[in-house]
Image (cartoon, rainbow, N blue to C red):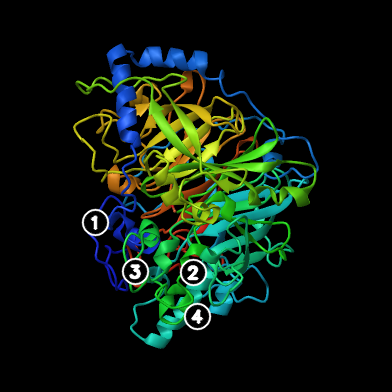
């Protein structure tokens, strides 16, 4: 099969000027949020102006890279004292995998960046890769094998879903069995099907899209600890969660008038989850998933401030077409005006119990949740860090009311009750002009301070003019009202399991109105990473912050910055998205947007956080043409790295694919690959 240049067939709504990422991604994944009006029109201060003030102060001090490294060595371990979960029978999950014997850390020679048009999955010398499971692979023996020419809603509901994002590999105590959990964020109709205008066929496909989204839980096994994993057909815990699965609403907004619809007059049960992007695995072994671009699935009236703040503008049709036959996706319909209020939450599923009812936690607020990552505070309460992935939106933190315990049953309720906070960043010196491009930021333990502003206290609203239910359903507006800091699209926000410091991936915000691209600090085409140090305990309300990285290709972006590490020695990196840690405490970053910004494929990068290697960005892998790298999981003690490959070949079509990942050549069954398939990949030595 010949690979072809992109075409735009089968995309009826496409009206997009090519930007830094694929126009197809913009339409299908984010409902062209970049092209719409600003959702956040509040007058709140933006992080850029604060960062400018801090960088300016450093410029005046005239510190250089060598001084920065020295500061980092001296301060890196100081402020964020490690905390650990109580030893209790109810606590398990991801910690189990990092506690296994084996050397901490993963050694490899960084790969060279791969040009964006190359359709290959590239790993370092000494490593190899193979998929564990791909879109369409059957989870049950009663489900048909994948056949792209014979797709049905029923088959898809028993097969692995499309466009993999958040991923975890949770081993059982034996280390030889476990579960793989994966989010399926959205679908690519242009790659799944040939073009058609047939109304009946479009509706049939709509039901396939409903079944292809959501989440998958799949059992995995291997012969020996350290071997690569394979998935198990008919595993006891195998489960698909789709747009029709019933979820329970929990927390103060459950049962409120804001979430009642004609189909659910009690406001307590929601069909489905949408836009499941990143997530996290809790210390008690459940999986959290962020409902991110849920707005793209609804036809919106957008005639109220509340609707505008979430949808940007009114729409009459969506790329899935569900609104044409399922009234809950048409917010113009009487009885369903509140349906969008039932999406945009953190959902929690129990991967150990395939009969459990998944839940949506209103106490954690409603916005375009990227994900949530939990850490147990010194006082035993649990803290979840969360980003709202929209230009100029906010960074949040949830603190549970109750403490973690040995009771799994009680731990399953921890995220239903607690308080929600939003971040306010402050620079610690007056703003000053940066003069010249040589005045790069330097590194230190504290480059500014900040405060977690409460939206609720003791579970009740403290925002003037907002009821508790309004705070939790219209969280963005409540955060606007109390002066939260506008951020550059917060993606994954994750505390280090070693230090408790929190790392915030801010993917980009190149269209921020205040941008001065001549200024080495203000331009943010490539995104950056902020390091937060909680200064009043993990559950406290004060923090310090510093810039860890200003991303970009140092060969072309002279203000790229990597915690003071010599930038001629780092791998180019752009648009940080998901983050993870290995057992050594090194940060791993996967990217979404490198092809359109630095001309290379997206990838996975390791970044040490302490010592003389702090800031030494090293690329571990590169994903195929048009794909983004998602869900990294690093089991360094076993020499295993896992990623989800999302939207490979996205700029192609069914008839003219731009990628044949992952079955280059042929499948194991001898079939010739004709289409790309999103998949979960494991990388191992060999
Ligand atoms: Fe689905 Fe914020 O990325
Ligand atoms: Ca993401
Ligand atoms: Ca993560």
* Residue extending furthest toward the front: 465
- Of badges 2 and 3, nearer the viewer stands 2
Mark 2–mark 3 distance (CA, rounded to whole Å): 32 Å
Residue at image location 65% in from the left, 40% down from the top: 382
Residue with the mark numbered 2: 339
Crowding near pointer 2: few (<14 within 10 Å), some, many (20+)? Answer: many
Circle 4/circle 3 CB separation < 8 Å: no
Mark 1–mark 4 distance (CA, rounded to whole Å): 33 Å
Residue at image location 67% in from the left, 76% down from the top: 142
Q: Determine which quarter of the picture holds residue 191.
A: bottom left
Element marked by disc 4: loop
Q: Earlier in the sequence, mark 1 or mark 3?
A: 1
- Residue 18's tag is 1
Residue with the mark numbered 3: 653
* Residue 236 left/right relative to 555: right
Crowding near pointer 1: few (<14 within 10 Å), some, many (20+)? Answer: few
Q: Position of residue 241 (x, y in %)?
A: 60, 66
Q: Position of residue 111 (x, y in %)?
A: 42, 37
Mark 4–mark 3 distance (CA, rounded to whole Å): 17 Å
Residue with the mark numbered 4: 150
């Amino acid at each position: 099969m010949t690979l072809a240049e992109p075409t735009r067939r089968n995309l009826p709504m496409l009206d997009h000027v090519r930007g830094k990422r694929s126009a197809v991604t913009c339409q299908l994944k984010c409902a062209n949020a970049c092209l719409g009006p600003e959702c956040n029109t509040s007058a709140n201060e933006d992080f850029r102006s604060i960062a400018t003030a801090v960088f300016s102060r450093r410029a005046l001090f005239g510190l250089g890279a060598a001084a920065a490294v020295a500061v980092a060595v001296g301060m890196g371990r100081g402020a964020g004292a490690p905390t650990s979960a109580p030893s209790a029978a109810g606590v398990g999950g991801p910690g189990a995998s990092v506690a296994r014997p084996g050397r901490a850390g993963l050694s490899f020679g960084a790969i060279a960046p791969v040009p964006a048009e190359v359709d290959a999955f590239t790993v370092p010398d000494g490593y190899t890769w193979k998929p564990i499971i791909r879109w369409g692979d059957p989870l049950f023996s009663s489900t048909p094998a994948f056949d792209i020419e014979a797709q049905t809603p029923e088959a898809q509901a028993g097969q692995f879903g499309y466009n993999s994002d958040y991923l975890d590999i949770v081993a059982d105590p034996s280390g030889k069995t476990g579960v793989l959990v994966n989010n399926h964020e959205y679908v690519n109709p242009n790659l799944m099907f040939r073009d058609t205008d047939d109304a009946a066929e479009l509706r049939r496909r709509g039901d396939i899209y409903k079944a292809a989204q959501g989440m998958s839980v799949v059992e995995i096994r291997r012969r020996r600890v350290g071997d690569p994993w394979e998935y198990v057909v008919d595993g006891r815990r195998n489960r698909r969660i789709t747009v029709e699965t019933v979820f329970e609403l929990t927390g103060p907004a459950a049962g409120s008038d804001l979430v009642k619809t004609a189909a659910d007059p009690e406001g307590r049960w929601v069909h489905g989850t949408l836009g499941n992007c990143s997530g996290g695995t809790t210390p008690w072994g459940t999986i959290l998933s962020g409902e991110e671009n849920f707005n793209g699935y609804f036809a919106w009236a957008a005639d109220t401030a509340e609707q505008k703040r979430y949808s940007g503008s009114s729409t009459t049709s969506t790329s899935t077409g569900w609104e044409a036959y399922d009234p809950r996706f048409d917010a113009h319909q009487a009885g369903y005006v509140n349906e969008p209020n039932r999406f945009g939450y953190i959902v929690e599923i129990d991967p150990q119990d395939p009969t459990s009812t998944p839940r949506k936690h209103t106490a954690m607020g409603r916005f375009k949740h990227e994900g949530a990552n939990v850490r147990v505070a010194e006082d035993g309460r649990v803290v979840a860090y969360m980003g709202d992935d929209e230009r100029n939106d906010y960074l949040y933190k949830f603190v549970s009311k109750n403490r973690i315990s040995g009771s799994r049953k009680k731990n399953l309720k921890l995220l239903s009750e607690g308080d929600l906070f939003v971040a306010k960043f402050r620079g610690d010196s007056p703003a000053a002009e940066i003069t010249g491009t040589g005045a790069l930021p330097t590194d230190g333990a504290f480059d500014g301070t900040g405060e977690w502003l409460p939206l609720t206290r003791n579970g009740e609203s403290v925002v003037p003019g907002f009821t508790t239910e309004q705070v939790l359903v219209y969280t963005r507006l409540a955060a606007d009202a109390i002066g939260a800091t506008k951020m550059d699209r917060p993606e994954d926000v994750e505390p280090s399991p070693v230090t408790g410091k929190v790392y915030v991936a801010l993917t980009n915000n190149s269209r921020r109105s205040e941008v001065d691209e001549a200024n080495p600090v203000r331009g943010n085409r490539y995104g950056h990473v902020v390091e937060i140090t909680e200064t009043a305990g993990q559950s406290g309300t004060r923090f310090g912050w510093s810039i860890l990285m200003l991303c970009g290709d140092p060969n072309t972006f002279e203000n790229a910055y990597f915690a003071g590490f010599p930038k001629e020695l780092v791998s180019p990196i752009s648009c940080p998205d998901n983050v993870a840690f290995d057992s050594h405490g090194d940060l791993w970053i996967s990217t979404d947007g490198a092809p359109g910004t630095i001309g290379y494929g997206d990838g996975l990068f390791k970044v040490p956080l302490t010592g003389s290697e702090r800031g030494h960005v090293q690329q571990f892998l590169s994903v195929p043409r048009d794909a983004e790298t998602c869900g990294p999981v690093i089991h360094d003690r076993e020499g295993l790295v896992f990623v989800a490959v999302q939207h490979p070949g996205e700029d192609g079509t069914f008839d003219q694919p731009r990628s044949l990942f992952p079955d280059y050549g042929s499948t194991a069954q001898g079939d010739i690959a004709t289409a790309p398939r999103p998949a979960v990949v494991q990388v191992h030595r060999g």
